[in-house]
Image: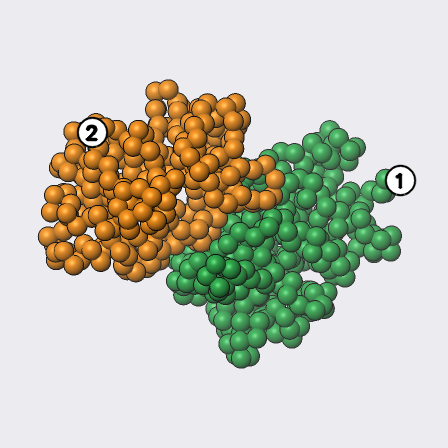
Amino acid sequence: MPQEFTATVVASERLGAGNVLATYAVPAKVLGNPVAGQFVMARCGTTHDPLLRRPFSPIGWDARAGLLALLILRGGQASRWLADRAPGDRVEMIGLLGTGFALKPTTRRALLVAGGVGIAPLLALAEQALAKEVSVTLLAGAATAAGLLPPSRVPTAVEYVVATADGSAGHHGFVTDLVLPYLDWADQIFACGPNPMFLSLARVMRQHAPLELLPPAQFSVEEYMACGLGVCMGCVTETRRGPQRVCKEGPVFDWRELSWL
Amino acid sequence: MAVNVAVDLAPRSPRELRLRNPIIAASGTFGYGTEYAGLTDVQSLGAIVCKGTTITPRRGNSLPRIVETPAGMLNAIGLQNYGVERVAREFGPLWATWQVPVLVNLVGDSVAEFRAMAELLDETPGIAGLELNISCPNVDRGGMLFGIDCAAAAEVTAAVRAATTLPVMVKLTPNVTDIVAIARAVADAGADCLSLINTLLGMAIDVRRRRPVLGNVTGGLSGPAVKPIALRMVYQVAAAVDVPVVGIGGISSLTDALEFLMAGATAVQVGTANYVQPDLMATMVRELPEWLAGQGYHDIHQIIGIAQPEAVRAARFPNLATPAAD
């Protein structure tokens, strides 16, 4: 059951371009049974502007220590406010919310495909997969090198391959350009990023093999959210079962359910 | 000293709508009352108005459906909902066990649809009343909104009034030239109480993509940005009708709620703020009697309408305290 709680900043590390890896002390009840891909709704200010909370999928946590970490890419007013909090500052959050990734017990090789800030829940998933001795390849794309997670932040056991749209790091192009060689290797695929990335990823997958020969894939969908609690019906995505709430039935969906792909 | 904060929203109704306190969850911001379990004390609220309900299920609008604007948000959800039969079947029995009364918010395409839904809910256990959303197109009149025309607003109100003995609250749209005229027409047609305001029609444009942000192009503006407009309209309507008025629009604190009560609202609905602070309404329920007691009041009716002019106070709000001197 989601909780409303106060998170206290205990560390805030600059990653370049004003992006921040923030670690918060949170009440133990919040981390009772966390699943990678779930999210918190964070209040990004103390006034009416910005008004709405913003969703963030934790990049990691330590349940025993009561720590939760968020990757904050410096963007609009809300993310800037959150990124600028200093140790000791408090942030109001609700969580954990939504349905996360489900790593199959039989999975031995996991392919993770990240676009932009979408890397956050996938890094959390990578940690869980490594703990189960699953081989992990993480493909990550961003507009520029500054938008990427530094390799030092990725566990060394993870094969980490990057792409940038401007060629400032790794492959010059999109992260989905990197996927093809891994499709026969992986026995489960996990992706998180903007919708155009999913469209491109689905195209690559379909061109490679018929559906029944492809590894099962779970996509964590991004959409504007007002409440994050399943109430406002603002964040739906079209599925074969009709419109489903990204915040409640999602954000993680079996890619075959997403009718817009 | 115990402070009375109970209010009666349907003094003319054979089936009462007495609330233990005047804090109501606005339609579309509190789901069916089940979604906030664990985040707030749902049963402590004065009432809940459920998500807008149509005669058959609706899929809603294309994306994006919401966008934040300065101190507010635009929504164009498109009434995605389960349909009235499923709401009655699934939630009626649950609500019947609740302490907090639940009103069903109804949206129809025609007078006949409103009437049919009211008839269906009339005998459904667990439903404390109806709120009519008349900010919707009337297909029998070429799609003109019910709520912007006195005759159409009165017609749908009278039809529902005739179809049910449930208390009927009619929710007014602010997108009109003269909301007082609509309010009078609806009250005369048999509404037990009025709620206002619904969202203000607005839009936002994505400069980078050079097109409207919302899939529906326009949407309803809500949140703190609309509060002064809502307050003005409540002040005008409360002076003009003899049924209770429920104030809605950007309420985000007890002080905001007090403004509406002093303008003449008998109760208030909290909407967008529920998204931001799920525990806000329950906090207001706790704070309201404390505030009243601290000011020396023993009954909420001592402040309802207190900011109205002397003549209005004398005519409409007989239980008022004497306004404090400056």
**Of the residues shown, which amino acid type is indicated by label 1?**
Ala
Q: Tell me if mark 2 has few (under 14), some (14-19) or many (20+) residues whose alpha carbon lies within 10 angstroms of its own.
A: some
Chain identifier, colour green:
B
Q: Position of residue B60 (x, y in %)?
A: 42, 62
Q: Which residue is mark 1?
A: B325
Q: Is residue A169 left or right of residue A217?
A: right
SS type, badge 1: loop
Q: In terms of secondary structure, where does tag 2 sit?
A: loop
Chain identifier matching the orange colour in the rendered picture? A
Kindly report the distance in space between the C-alpha atoms of the residues bearing marks 2 and 1.
74 Å
Examine the rendered structure and indicate whether residue B166 appears above or below residue A103. below
Q: What residue appears at the point 46 percent right and 61 percent down from the top-left corner? A: B209
Extreme residue in the front direction: A168
Residue type at mark 2 is Ala
Which residue is found at the position 50% from the left and 54% from the top?
B67
Q: Residue tagged by mark 2?
A: A157
Residue A159 in the image, given as x and y percentages of width and height: 20, 35
Residue B315, placed above or below residue B179: above
* Label 2: chain letter: A
Tell me, for residue B169, which label it has, or none. Answer: none
In the depicted structure, whether residue B137 falls above or below residue A7: below
Q: Quadrant of the N terminus of chain B?
A: top right
